[in-house]
Amino acid sequence: MTSAASQIESQTESLTITRPDDWHVHLRDNPLLPHTVAATAATFARAIVMPNLAPPVTTVELAEGYYQRIVQALPTGMSFEPLMVLYLTADTSPQEIAAAAAHPHVHAVKLYPAGATTNSAYGVRDPDAIDHLYAALEENDLPLLMHGEVIDPAVDIFDRERVFIERHLLRIREKFPALRMVLEHITTGDAVQFVLSQPKNTAATITPQHLMLNRNDLLAGGIRPHNYCLPILKRRTHQEALRQVITTNDARFFLGTDSAPHAQHAKETACGCAGCYSAPAALAFYATVFEECGALQHLEAFASHHGPDFYRLPRNTETVTLVRQPQTIPEAVDAYGTRIIPWQAGGTIPWSLA
Ligand code: NCD
Ligand code: ZN
Ligand code: ZN
């Protein structure tokens, strides 16, 4: 937008909002924790911490141990509350789900279709074979978070989210109407339509990369491994569906960065890992996109209101301030000996955290 009118409209020089939370992040484990926890806590008051460690966080006891390691890694003077998640397997018991619901640090369970993404080998082979666990989640009112992609090798990778909705999600949604569920990191217009067609207890998180990029940014003019994440970037029409829905201020959509660091050598290789490390500049990425979409006035609700309302947690009371001051994403970061290329390395965005 270059017209004089639009320039006048976009005069907002700073934006103070309720401190946000990240409803989907990968903090990994030691020795990375001091770096990843500080990077997330610099912006976010709380985060839903993904349990796909190796081995995965499958029990309340493992979740509590992980919680303690995260809290120990938090630099003095910073405030941050990790919200823990159990990794669902075919062997998870309904008793473990009841124990998770009763535990003050556990806030959800996560369904990974086996093999769908990083460290998902212990996940669920058949999402239609664990109805007793959905029943336990519904009964205990514990949210089900989903990596929503089928693992059927016959299904094209660009169709795996849509087919997951058609083959599994519609049935699960109908059979367990009171279950609170979050379709994580949505990437398609199909996922947007699915969520919009459901009552308020069906929500979705949206990442910066799926709002800012489409598959051309991954594959056209050279392959860009740092834009490779799962679910994979889709065609532009799907990106546009995501950009459209954030302008509607619908409470079912909220911030989840899916910040997922991998070492540089694990991404820049013949068979590279999926995941974008966006945490350090995450809120500024979202501000950039919301402004491009003419929806800066809805950033606060997306980042700071819809998530806690869905999880039935209080909204934060502190604030953070974004300023219109360009920042350039570093070419690399050194996370206690692990070299990581942050998402959008070398790029410049118009907003910074004050
Ligand atoms: C995530 C990771 O690296 O743990 N990667 C990704 O591409 N999103 C896993 C996940 O969230 O699917
Ligand atoms: Zn995932
Ligand atoms: Zn993730």
Image: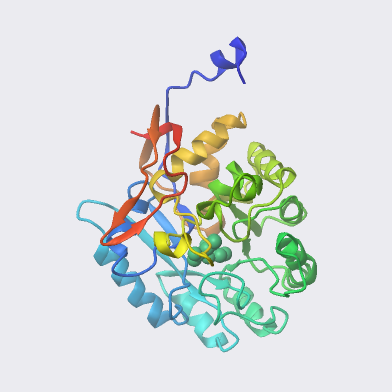
Q: Residue at x 59, y 30 (%)?
A: 292
Q: Quadrant of residue 231?
A: bottom right
Q: Is residue 19 left or right of residue 233?
A: left
Image quadrant containing the N terminus: top right
The residue sitting at 50% across, 53% down in the picture is 226
Q: Count all numbered tags in the image, as a single digit.
A: 0
Residue 290: x and y in percent read: 56, 35
Apparent side of residue 74 relative to residue 11 in the rendered image (left or right): left
Would you place residue 242 above or below residue 140 in this image?
above
Left or right, residue 214 beside residue 30: right
The image shows residue 73 at horizontal and vertical percentages of 26, 63
Residue located at (47% from left, 59% from top): 268
Q: Residue furthest top?
A: 4
* 343 in relation to 47, above or below: above
Q: Quadrant of the C terminus?
A: top left
**Residue extending farthest left:** 76
- Picture residue at 66% right of the left edge, 53% below the top: 187
Image-quadrant location for residue 148:
bottom right
Q: Looking at the image, which is closer to me, 120 or 139?
A: 120
Q: Position of residue 221 (x, y in %)?
A: 62, 44
The percent position of residue 213, horizontal first and vertical second, equals: 60, 44
Q: Is residue 88 above or below residue 72?
A: below
